[in-house]
Image (cartoon, rainbow, N blue to C red):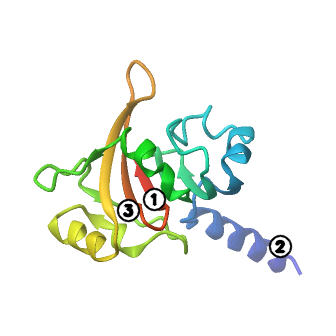
Amino acid sequence: MRRIPTAICCLALIAVLTDCGHDTERFYSARADAEKGGEFTRGWLPDFLPKTSHKIHLAYDLSPSEEWCGFEFDPLEAEQLLNSIEPVNPAAPPIPAIPSPSVQWWPKFLEGDLDGRTLQRAAQSGVALYSVTRRLSQVQNVTLVFAIDRRSGRAYFYGH
């Protein structure tokens, strides 16, 4: 009889120790909901996301600090977004690799090394890669790598 509680405790401990999930995964139907949720204030979402951003998927880990985001926006606001970021230089990618967030909404072509093949796969999908480095504090910066399909109004970014 005593073995059942011990087995349950062991299984619970194994589940905690092997958890590969994220600290947080959230969904917001509109930018205003993400603002109310504090995602911009906490720095998980950049202020320059288009006002029409919607269907916002966000996954992040606190240690190490990483974030993955997917969202949709009105294609007429693409220029506003593009004015805040720079095209990725294939000779000097902003980060060596994008880890898999293990979520269904993240595109597979955005996993792994950012190299010529990644840019080619992105272009074949109608997507261009961009990046921006933002200052989070006096001692901490974050680089965001964006994949944007201007025609469909769909974008993704990874930050580390």
Amino acid beneath label 1? Tyr
Residue drawn 30% across and 57% down?
Answer: 129
Residue 123 is marked as: none
Of the two numbered discs 2 and 3 on the same chain, state the one appearing first in sequence.
Answer: 2
Q: Where is residue 123 in the image (x, y as percent from the top left)?
A: 27, 70
Quadrant housing residue 6: bottom right
Mark 1, Cα crowd under 10 Å, few <14 / some 14-19 / many 20+, is many
The label nearer to you, 3 versus 1, is 1
Quadrant housing residue 22: bottom right
Q: Quadrant of the C terminus?
A: top left
82 vs 122: above or below? above
Quadrant housing residue 45: top right
Q: Position of residue 107 (x, y in %)?
A: 43, 72
Mark 2, Cα crowd under 10 Å, few <14 / some 14-19 / many 20+, is few
Write down the residue under mark 3. Answer: 99
Left or right, 157 with reference to 114? right
Residue drawn 75% across and 68% down?
Answer: 9
Write down the residue under mark 2. Answer: 5
The label nearer to you, 2 versus 3, is 3
Q: Nearer the viewer, residue 24 or 32?
A: 32
Q: Which residue is at the far left? A: 91
Secondary element under disc 1, as helix, strand or loop, is strand
Per the model, the C-alpha gap separating discs 2 and 3 is: 37 Å
Q: Which residue is at the far right? A: 1
Per the model, the C-alpha gap separating discs 2 and 1 is: 44 Å
Write down the residue under mark 1. Answer: 156
Secondary element under disc 3, as helix, strand or loop, is loop
Q: In which quarter of the image is the N terminus?
A: bottom right
Q: Position of residue 104 (x, y in %)?
A: 55, 75
Residue drawn 30% across and 70% down?
Answer: 122
Secondary element under disc 2, as helix, strand or loop, is helix
